[in-house]
Image (cartoon, grey):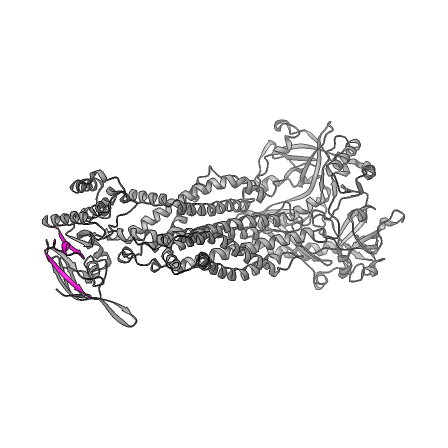
Amino acid sequence: MFKNHLKIAWRSLKKQPFFTFLNTFGLAIGIAGGLLISLYIYDELSYDRMFADADRIHRIHADIKFGGEDRKFAVTPAPMAEVAQNDFSEVELAMRFRTQGSLLLRKADTEANIKELQTTFVDSTFFKMFGLDLLAGDIKTALKSPNTLILTKSAAEKHFSINDAVGQTLILDNDDSYSVTGVIDDFPQNSFLRDHTVFMAMSGYEDSRIVNWGSNNYQTYIKLIPSANVEDIQEPLRDFLGRYVIPGVQQFMPGFTEEQFKAAGNHLIYSTMPLTDIHLRSDRVAEISRNNKLQSIYILSFIAIFLLVLACVNFMNLSTAHSLKRAKEVGIRKTLGSNRGELIRQFLIESGLVSMASLVLAVILAVILLPMFNDLADKNISMPYTNPFFWLILLASGVVLGLFSGGYPAFFMSKFIPVKVLKGTSSNSLGGGKVRNALVIFQFAISVFLIIGTLVVYQQLDYIQNKDLGFSKDQVLIVNDAFSLDNNANSFKEEVKKLSYVKNATLSSFFPTPSSRSDSTFAPEEGLTDQENALSMQRWGVDFDYVSTMDFEIIAGRDFNRDFKNDSTNIIVNESAVSVIGVSPEEAIGMRYTPDFGEDNPEFFTIIGVVKDFHFSPFRAEIESLSLHLSDRAYALAIKLESGNFSNAIAGIEGIWNQIAPGQPFDYYFMEDRFNDTYQSEQRLGRIFFIFTALSILIACLGLFGLAAFNAEKRTKEIGIRKVLGASVSQISYRLSMDFLKLVGVAILISLPLGWFAMNKWLEDFSYRIEIGVWVFAVAALLAIAISIITVSYQSIKAAIVNPIKSLRTE
Amino acid sequence: MLVQLNNIFKWVQSGGQRIFLLKDINLEVEEGEFISIMGPSGSGKSTLLNVIGMLDAFDEGEYNFLDESVHSLKEKDRSRLYKQYIGFVFQSYHLLDDLTVQENLEMPLLYKKMKSPERKAKVADILDRFNIVAKKDLFPAQLSGGQQQLVGVARALIANPKLILADEPTGNLNSTQSKEIMELFKQLNQEGVTIVQVTHSETNAAYGSRTINLLDGRRII
């Protein structure tokens, strides 16, 4: 019997190649999309789970509201790790990272430096915390003594073979000598340490031993004992404020009390987050690596489910519509003795065949599309061919999809009553029309929703890219590692400025890109110890050309000027700082602030200018207070170029670099690119939205196309009669198309409010955002209508031009 | 007694009125009979045939088939009953277009869950008996109307039913083909198969052993 079912299923599919194609292809697109997104989500969810005991590792956080700023840090004070280990019996182990950004590395006795982008100091408990093994070196001594480091395999291989790495000496930033005590394997792409390559012993980092609760610079991880409950340490962690932080501050601000601190509306809350949650749930200041947002996982899951449901709906629609042709068969089979179960089984086998074919096609599609998808999602996902679970899940989902999408048609068709269908009663009485209509509405509602989503995401991205930033990000080239030039940094700058295509240049470590931060707390000259006057500000060291190169607008006071002798004790602040102080920009000029209010002879800085606010952190966040100081220490040179041939300019600047610093790597980027990187996750979302919107519309159109064909066929007789009675081709095709347009209309009405609501929710995340205009809805609606007219009209016109003699001829 | 209908009524409700399709039908069919049902269009011939074939329900009355009371049987048992004892022949043949002659013939046996060797033997048998061995791999569309109906009759017969119900079996055939089919029915009847046919044609009716006439759902003779 099974063989027979299979045979008949195969023949009936073969007999209707167009219908079978629509069904298979629609379903395959849905599955391929769902498969790719599932792989992506699986990868996202797998972050940091590869570490042994990952479920027992937590990171300590700090939420701090002070000095007019309210911020959430991923970092804590240096003493936190030790205190946590000593105070909590639940804590088995604690360790810290003190990230250092990029470093230049060279082997002793060689000239050429190699740049490593992500480096960090770590405590020697690093290995135990994350269950790491050394490929070379002794785990008992590695990272114990000062000036030792370990490297990842790929970083080590740049300098020497792994086997003789241990014991070698590396010079860091042309300055400190470190000896290599171990080599570890590279970290997987889905770990928070994926980009870190150099780990230096914390014991050589002086600051790490100073008990200072006032600055937050250390990523602190704790591992709990197996029986511990992380909730049990939350309450005691909160008490750290009164127990450690306040007494620490009182050393230099004797009148400082916890009550006073809280009464001013301030807070400082320490809490923890599981290691495995960080990648998707943490968006704090000073994250160790770029995280993703849980929200985007939700959005993608929805899209994946949408796609699959859309494809299944298509399948149901086409199959039930098509069932008309099968009605006679059902009738005959029933009179020949088939019962309903038998028929249901037969139709399920048929849909099972289609879904298996779609599955195969989907895997092929997914394999072809994977590189593009990786590009799109900025991932490095591969098909887990060797994982039996992958195939098992794939097969299971094929079966489930087959049952799900084939179930309704099978149920529907097996219900036909032989006497009716064999007599050839009018096909309208077969029913299922309402369900089909509902399904079409559903499909188009989703499509319109996704169109709205795409439009809003792109509009917001466009807004960000073209918003007045308060500075000019275009044509600014930033050359890194200026410090490696030592005292030649200034002559490099002067030489570069002489080039004809260079407008201006400035040396600084801080630029209006999101990675630039240097938090400080300032106090005014009057009311020095009154913490209500404290002002949290960024403290950026710059030179005389900074404001002019960046094109900042001075709205009060003046820029730094070489002609003023004591400008080194002056600062320029931004509008936000002035508004936190609570004065007008003009009034702020001449006010004096100090960052070292705890010390005996604090150094005061006088405000000499106020710059218009500029966006230096992402648009998601409000602009923070900021101050500019003159400083000799600079990490990079920012060069404002004339528009024109950039590659020429870069070559020229590199030439100067090589003269001044032979052997040093020339490393540069354009500020605009760095700026765009910040919106990567939004841009990615935009692209993903766009692609999957297109896919869902394609699927919906396939379905609509099939339905229109069916509808025209069903009404062949009616169309014939109408034509005999004098209806024109256009009247008939209008009539047929209207049937569907009504459904699309209903779909639009449903999805507009949903789209409005959902996208407003998404926009809430941005401090600077667009308002959703009416035109978005108009465009989405018109697009849906236009697409459906194009899809349906082909079939309608085709049906309308048939000669009525043909359609009215009886059997 | 093969079929016994007592006071069968069947109606449809239309605009608050009952329209009777069958009105007080009494009929007995003995094994070995060949009955023709006649009457003008809309007189209820096909409805009566469908009721006898258990494809259609009735609203009032009693129906006994081989001493089982069909009116009180469950759907499942009714389907078992007609699967076992009744074969259908249709005016428009109703062969499955996607299956070959051989496969069409095999279908009722499959539904009876007959084992493959037995099935094959039966199909070969009937192909032989109906002289259509050469056509066994053809699809219905490749056959003439007469040949298709021949397959239709063969299919009705293959499971050895006690009763064959034929709804205008020659309605779509020309006179030569008609004659062949009717001769076939006559021969089958002589071999012991009970036949009830619906027909418009006096000639065809004459093949039967008796004729029942319907008018507006009532039996007039």
Examine the structure image and report whether residue B215 is included in the region drawn in magenta. Answer: yes
Q: In which quarter of the image is residue B135?
A: top left
Measuring 47% from the left and 48% from the top, which residue is drawn there?
A30
In the rendering, at what x and y percent does residue A635 appear?
Answer: 76, 41
Q: In this view, does A360 lie above or below A236?
A: above
In the rendering, at what x and y percent does residue A458 appear?
Answer: 61, 52
Q: Is residue A657 above or below residue B139?
A: above
Between B155 and A636, the residue placed more toward the observer is: B155
Between A252 and A100, the residue placed more toward the observer is: A100
| Direction from residue A390 to residue A147 in the image, left or right | right
Where the N terminus of chain A falls, by quadrant?
top left
Res A228 seen here = no
Res B183 seen here = yes
Outermost residue to the bottom: B16
In the rendering, at what x and y percent does residue A560 appear?
Answer: 85, 49
| Direction from residue A138 to residue A178 in the image, left or right | right
Measuring 47% from the left and 61% from the top, which residue is drawn there?
A742
Q: Give the range drawn in magenta.
A: B193-216
Tell me how many marks there are.
0
In the rendering, at what x and y percent does residue A810 appear?
Answer: 30, 54
Examine the structure image and report whether residue A373 is included in the region drawn in magenta. Answer: no
Measuring 74% from the left and 47% from the top, which residue is drawn there?
A511
Between A674 and A708, the residue placed more toward the observer is: A708
| Direction from residue A498 to residue A59 in the image, left or right | left
